[in-house]
Amino acid sequence: MVDRGAEGVGRAHGITVGAFPHYPNNPWQSLLYREVEAQGATIVTIPRLEDLLRLGETSPDWSGFVLHVNWTGAVTQIGDDVLESMRRVSAFLGVADQILAGGGHLVWTIHNVLPHEIRYLLPEIHLLSELARRASRIVIMNPATVAEISAVVDIDPATVVLIDHPSYLGHYPNEQNRTGARARFGFDEDDIVVLSLGAIRPYKNIERLAAAVGRAQRDEPRLRLLVGGELGPGADRSALEAALDAVGARYSLDYVSDAEIQHWMNAADFAVFPYTHLLNTGALMLAATFGIPAVVTSVPATEGLCMEDWVVPIPQGLGRDDIAEAMLTAVRDFGDRGHIRAAAIRFAEAHHPDVISDAFATLICQIVVGGQSGR
């Protein structure tokens, strides 16, 4: 833990972290900031670029302030055309430079190589390049990040800090047993329930997953598909519902609340992630938190993950038959539920939110106290 000092005042006393953008439905941010806030820091949530611009008008003195930049699409992928996107990038960089000139700092966490539904590529690349130039530290959650993003932007390895994505241990209720959870969805005890939970977006290939379940059911008729999550940008409700209905899936295309997540997770035998783009995913950490094994796209960024006992890889082709075969492999490999569940939970414990939050708090304190600046 970060040293709180003799009088219990944390090292982060006097520090302000500006969380941009802030998404209240994403628990990653609250888990990450938990320790630095406990150490005395103030967390300022900044949902939109417009909020950041207003914040930039408040003070010329930014000493002790750290602008923590996360999902860059909140700057670049909003607007009617590429010119508006570029204007937004310029406005953001103006505020960032004002903060740096006033004694503040910038930390950038890389979540994805590029936004999933990208419309304006050139403004995005420009913003990433400027963030790399200004950041005191660049936080990555996957060791493959620097190599993955190198085709888009050059990053100085000296600025890079690895702080893993946390699991969600202790965050969600987990009181519902398997039998009760399955009964809520009408599953029989011997059904093999395949889960996809989280916001539904095109890169997650949920329609293809449904087709793969239909293919796999020819060999394993006990397979059942369970899908929950609100529709995101680019999702086609009619096409998705038709694909899910064709294989008898149980689904809800609405937001799944924190209190309900335990029912979905505990009803499942394993979760499937046939994602086209996969660098970091909270949904995978959620599965580990509940001891649910996973079937995951095999790409360089998941090479280490796919060696875990509780994970089965999907070949990079991501065809219907590839996903189906991976699920059938999971049915065979995940037969010993106790052993597999324990392996997943060990992974979650190794990424406990307290450990990750401690690491982030230490980083923020080092930057502010040590006066590390962007270039």
Image (cartoon, helix red, strand yellow):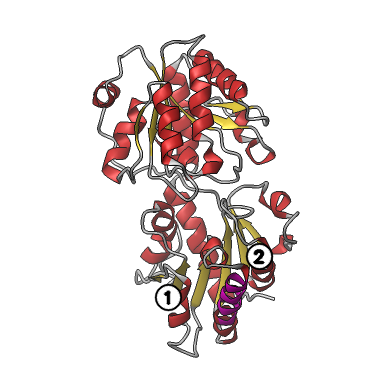
Q: Residues within 10 Å of mark 1 (few under 14, many from 20)?
A: few
Look at the picture and state if 333 lies above or below 225. above
Q: Which residues are magenta?
A: 83-94
Look at the picture and state if 299 lies above or below 232. above
Depth check, front residue: 359 or 310 = 310
Give the quarter of the image for residue 75. bottom right
Number of the label disc, if any, that sits on residue 1: none
Mark 1 touches mark 2? (CB < 8 Å): no
User: Residue placed farthest to the bottom in the image?
Assistant: 60
Residue type beneath disc 1:
Asp
Q: Is any atom of residue 294 visible in this view? A: no
Depth check, front residue: 255 or 286 = 255
Number of the label disc, if any, that sits on residue 128: 2
Q: What residue sits right under mark 1 in the picture? A: 51
Name the quarter where the N terminus is drawn.
bottom left
Q: Main secondary structure of the magenta part?
A: helix
**Horizontal and vertical percent position of residue 57:** 45, 87
